[in-house]
Image (cartoon, rainbow, N blue to C red):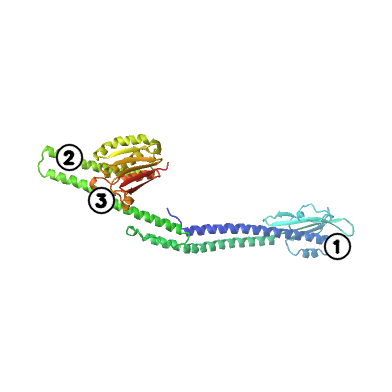
Amino acid sequence: MKTHSFAARLSLWLGLAVIVIFSLSGFTLYHSLATQIGVRDDAALLTRIDQIRTLLRDEDAITLIQQKPRLFANMLGNTESLLVLRFPGQPPLIVVNPGQRPIPAITPVAADQPLALSSVHHLLSDDGTPFISAAALAPTRDGNGQIEIITGRLMSDRTQTLNSYRDQIILATALAALLVAAISIWLVRRALTPLRRLAAQADAIDVRHLSQRMPEQAAAELQPLVAAFNQMLSRLERGYQQLSQVSADMAHDLRTPISTLIGQTEVALSQTRSVGDYQALLGSNYEELERLAKMIDNMLFLAKAEDASQVMDLQDIDLALLGEKLQDYFDGMAEEQSMRLEMALHGELRADPQLLQRALANLMANALRYGDRDSTVRIFNQGSTLMVENQGPALSAEQQARIFDRFWRADASRHQGSSGLGLSIVRSIMRLHQGSCEVHSEHGVNRFTLRFPY
């Protein structure tokens, strides 16, 4: 799926923002200007009526109107104005109507009433141009009645002014949007230069250079990204090293029984053997195959235990009852090692029963396998903290740090036939429970501790 660049998207959004802001500002200014011009034009129309009212107070005004009508036409100043003077119900004394527009039928303002902006009537011509008009009565000086004054004006100049102003706003908005978009593209690309530099440095990191880290002297906005990326590299490096070690250990552990099987089979096939010899060979091969099967089962269980999506069956477990089951199971192994089991589990613990039993069983098997003869293996708890303790060779700091790693075993223990996965399974089970496991070795006593959060 094709995606647009960050610079293009940001420029587009900034351009749209400028268009919206300028449009709102332009609309506000346009509306304000149109209102002000409209008020000015309405006031000018009313001023014209006031001027004619003043003129009609002169006793010679009627004669002047009749003799020199063009004088009033010249007073209007343009061909878009309208002026009608007449006695109500009689023919007009004067009609100035260059545009030949219909005379609006509006009610005049009484002679003794002042003119107000509300006296102005607003219409639209056939072509949509605004037309304003007003009418008023004015008394004559000779007292022969009142003259009706009707005046109006087609606002073509106002329309042209507002249209020109509108076009300028649209042009300014478009130019501003284009300018902001162009500047933002340049600024974003310039601002993303450190990010492109980091991308190039990250691209140079491969399996052979996992120890390389991104420089932390980056922009403040990029420092969290750099820190997270470096942490990811650390995890990848550690995981790759562990995977390499696991692969080497797995190859070693698989090669030994397979080599044994091949060697024994070759020897058996080199000459005819008795039935007893073949039975002994099959028994030996069975032991090696059983060891391989156990190793594979442990690896599958470990993979399942490390699956974060696995749903556990959490239950309230009676620790005393669980301790009895484990003691019954390991009594025979303890007797073979001339060792004793001391079980002191009590109370309840919320955990997955099968996983908890597997973790404790692995710790007990480990304690019996590597403990001193004629010693005691103690299994006890303090609330949700379970401990398995044996007496045996002290573990060094390095051994304590790596003892829960996959396939890791002390050199002296390789002859014991362990797969090196038991304690790794324990750690994975504790992680599933959001708990922890640790080992402490001091004065010939090795204590494994399981801490549950529940």
Q: Residue furthest left?
A: 272
Secondary structure category for the residue under label 2: helix
Check residue 282 in the rendering and tell me which mark sits there, or answer none: 2
* Coordinates of residue 431 in the picture (x, y in percent): 38, 45
* Coordinates of residue 214 in the picture (x, y in percent): 40, 60
Secondary structure category for the residue under label 1: helix
CA distance separating discs 2 and 1: 142 Å
Q: Residue at x 38, y 38 (%)?
A: 352
Check residue 61 in the rendering and tell me which mark sits there, or answer none: 1
* Coordinates of residue 149 in the picture (x, y in percent): 81, 57
Query: Which mark's residue is nearer the viewer, 3 or 1?
Result: 3
Q: State the residue in front, 156 or 221.
A: 221
CA distance separating discs 3 and 1: 131 Å
Secondary structure category for the residue under label 3: helix
The kind of residue on which mark 2 rests is Leu
Where residue 238 sits, quadrant-wise, is bottom left
Q: Residue at x 10, y 43 (%)?
A: 271
Q: Earlier in the sequence, mark 2 or mark 3?
A: 2
Q: State the residue in front, 145 or 92.
A: 145
Check residue 411 in the rendering and tell me which mark sits there, or answer none: 3
Task: Identify the image quadrant of the C terminus.
Answer: top left
- Circle 3 residues within 10 Å: few <14, some 14–19, many ≥20: few
Q: Are marks 2 and 1 in contact (CB under 8 Å)?
A: no
- Circle 2 residues within 10 Å: few <14, some 14–19, many ≥20: some
CA distance separating discs 2 and 3: 29 Å
Where residue 198 sits, quadrant-wise, is bottom left
